[in-house]
Each structure stands twice: as structure tokens, then as C-alpha cells.
Amino acid sequence: MRLVARDNRVLWVNSIGLRGPSASKSDIGRIFKKLAAVASPIREVETNLFVLSPLSIPAYGQPLLRDINRRLLRFQVKRAMRRLGFSRPINYVFLPSAGLIAGTLDEELVIYHCVDEYTAFSGMPSQALSEIEQQLVRRANLVIVSADLLYRSKSRFNPHTVLVRHGVDFEHFRRALDPSLLVPEDIAHLPRPIIGFFGLIADWVDLDLLVRVAKQFSQGSLVLLGKAITDVSRLECLPNVHLLGRKPYASLPAYCKGFDVALMPFRINELTLNANPLKVREYLAAGLQVVSTAIPEVEVLGLCRIGSDHDGFVQEVKLALADPGARVERSETVRSESWEARLEDIR
């Protein structure tokens, strides 16, 4: 959206949620943050980029609550549009829940940019969300998808569906090749090889595979960056596994510089078969060898080592370590896939 805001005024409406909250500590914390944000006015976070955090009820399976939610959201977004002087906007939405109000805001266009099979996430109200998304897909003037399987499923309901794969913040991750960039202190002195991963550690990450990698390369280090929202106790007990938590986006190139190999250890299921993981191109832009499970959108890229099972994955890590190749040349393979280039594709 920062790229779009260079030439347009943008009202970014923060996520209205896809699943109902639980009584967990993290969900309660999110509720309080949401309430605090609602109390704040529209914020201009950068030139031409405004942020609205609406109050909503993520309960899509109950018709009455769904209708209340629709009215509540429409009121808040319309009020924000009036305050900013917006009329006939292009409504560019990323989540199926936006289908509650898409097409009711006097838009010039509705564009749905679908980057995941959202109904496949754990804990989602799959049936209700599927109905809302299907309505959104049918209503949209244009549907953009990031994976071939998403194209096949969404184009059935809207012929104006196009495949635009993810881009990469190329110049940012290419900083990993800068000789003056320092590797962060918390990994700089770890035993080699350093096998790395960054991203949310959730139930779609194959933890058994990570345990296998850690044990196979017990003289080296397995570094995992990112918030863990699943049980990682089987990793925590291994001496060469370093769960370092979430790191600032700005620091990721420095961590990549310290990695010898990067991993894409996703389980193969409906969610990941439809996924086009952003981090693959980020790893590549940083010049890293990438070893992945058999995710279709990673395979079609043709730039990564693919392990079709645990044994094959470990073998590919060994091969990557034995033949690191030239990082600069590897980085150049994704130069043309910057977000700026993707935005031009969409335009």
C-alpha cells in the first residue's frame, strides 16, 4: 500500500478478523489493543496513507450477528470516507470478511486480492466464510490470486480472475550481500552450519521435520525466527535449536547474512497447496540456498531444492551445504520480481 500511496490517497482498514476470539491470553490481548485502536481517530501514518481500525464482531455463522457486523462496519468506513473526502473509491480488499460490505460503499471498482485459501486455516468458520467469500468473488470487478490452485478455484465464480504471483522487497533483502552489514550478535558465534527460518511458527509448519533437521545437523545450529503460536516444546529441548522469537523486519537481511541455508518446512495440506510463501523470494533475494517441502508454488519457481519427504528434505539440505553457489547470482534471479514490478502488472 505504500507504493500505491505514492500516487493515490489510501484508506487502509485494519483487519476485521476471520475467526471468533477465544479466552486465550493472546486473543484477550488483541481485544484490548483493538478497543484502544477504535478509540483513536483516523491516523495518517505516512503521506497519503490513512489507517482506520474499526470495531467489528467476528461471528460470521450467525445471520443476525453477521447483519449487525455489516451495518457496523459500513457505518464506520463510510464515516471515515466522508471525513477524508473520498468518493467513488477503488475498494481493494485482501480478506474474504470484507465481502460483508464490498460493493455497498458506492465504489468505482471492487478488487479482491486473494493470497490464501482462508477457509483452510485452523479455527475458521469455514462454511460461513466460504459463503461470504464466494459472494465477494462474484461481486468483484477483478479477482487477483497469487497461486495457480487459487486461480482454479476462484475463476469458477468470476471470469475476471488473474494470476499475479507475489513480489519481493528486493533491495531490502539484497542488503544481506552488503559486506558492511553485521550479522546479529545472537547468531554470529553459533556453530556452523546455521540453518535458518523466519516466519510465523504455526500448525502449518512441520515441526517433526525441523526436529529431524536439528538432529541430523547436531554439530550445527537451527535458528528459528518468529512468533510461535503452536507447541514447540519438542524443539525447545534440543540444544542446537535456537528459538529467537519475532525480529524486526529491518533486521531480517542481517539474519539472512548469517544463514548458510534457509528452510521452507511447511506441511503439505489444503492451506499450503494454495500458498505462495513470501519468504521464498525474500530468501532468494538475500542470496540464500532454499530447501522446501513440495509446495506447488515453490516448485514452479524452479529456484529451490525440493524435498518430497523427510529423508529427501534432509538430503537436499546436505547438498545445499556442500554446494553453496554464488549468492550474488542467486539474488539476481529475483530482481525482476520486485513489488514495484508486480504493481505494474496489476495496473
Image (cartoon, rainbow, N blue to C red):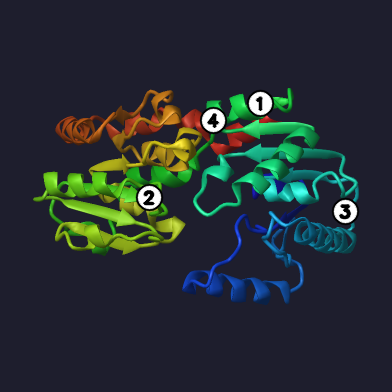
What residue is disc 2 on?
253
Q: Amino acid at mark 1?
A: Val
Q: What crowding class fits label 1: few (fewer than 14 Cα within 10 Å), some (14-19), or many (20 or more)? A: many
The mark nearer the N terminus, 2 or 3, is 3
- Establish if 7 lies above or below 298: below
Q: Position of 258 compared to 3: left or right? A: left
Residue at the (51%, 48%) spot, across then down:
121
- Separation (CA) of disc 4 from disc 3: 32 Å
Q: How far apart, in angstroms, are the residues tagged by discs 4 and 1?
A: 10 Å
Q: State the separation of the CA atoms marked 1 and 2.
A: 31 Å
Q: Secondary structure at mark 3?
A: loop
Residue 227 screen position, x and y as percent: 40, 61
Q: Which residue is mark 1?
A: 162
Give the structural element (helix, strand or loop) at label 1. strand
Where's the C terminus, which quadrant? top right
Neighbour tally class for label 2: few under 14, some 14-19, many 20 plus, Cα within 10 Å: many
N-terminal label among 1 and 3 = 3
- Label 4 belongs to which residue? 147
Nearer to us of marks 2 and 3 is 3
Q: Amino acid at mark 4?
A: Ala
Name the spot of residue 79 as percent of width and height, x first.
87, 63
* Mark 4–mark 2 distance (CA, rounded to whole Å): 26 Å
Which residue is identified by label 3?
Answer: 86
Q: How far apart are the two marked residues, 1 and 3, measured between alpha carbons? A: 27 Å
Quadrant assignment, res 131: top right
Which quadrant of the figure has residue 329? top left
Q: Are marks 4 and 2 in contact (CB under 8 Å)?
A: no
- Front: mark 1 or 2: 1
Residue 51: x and y in percent read 71, 61
Residue 159, placed above or below residue 115:
above
Instruction: Return the disc, 4 or 2, that comes first in the chain's sequence.
Output: 4
Residue nearest the viewer, comparing 47 with 288: 288
